[in-house]
Image: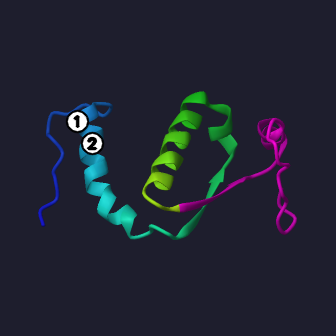
Amino acid sequence: MTEPRLPPSSAPHDAVHEAAVLANALPYLRRYAGDTIVVKYGGHAMGDAGLAKTFGRDIALLKQVGINLLWCMAGGRRSTRCSSGWTSPPTSLMGCA
């Protein structure tokens, strides 16, 4: 099976480029379908709207290919503010909030 190659002139945010990247990544992502991975979200990413949007897109993609996610935050004031509107309170594991 030959893998699709990226067009040489594509811009980083070009839809054709993104489609080619996903086509290349999909066989590797499928290996983890049904598995659970832990994703830490915190620090600088929580304070940057652009990084938060990218994080959300990446998480949605992982879920769509069948990967179960355990999302955790590092704790601190930003985590408290972020989780304040949730219907279920955050859970602290092993002393880590």
Residue name at image x 57 percent, y 65 percent: 37
Q: Secondary structure at mark 1?
A: helix
Query: What residue range appears in magenta?
Result: 68-97
**Which of the pair 3/11 is nearer the observer?**
3
Which residue position holds label 1?
16
| Residue 21 on image: x %, y % | 28, 48
Q: Amino acid at mark 1?
A: Val
Q: Amino acid at mark 2?
A: Ala
Quadrant showing the C terminus: bottom right
Q: Is residue 69 above or below residue 36?
A: above
**Which of the pair 1/10 is nearer the observer?**
1
Residue count near mark 2 (Cα–Cα under 10 Å), binned few <14, some 14–19, many ≥20: few
Residue 94 position by quadrant: bottom right
Instruction: Say which mark, if any, is on residue 19.
Output: 2
Residue name at image x 37 percent, y 65 percent: 30
Q: Residues under labels 1 and 2: Cα distance? A: 5 Å
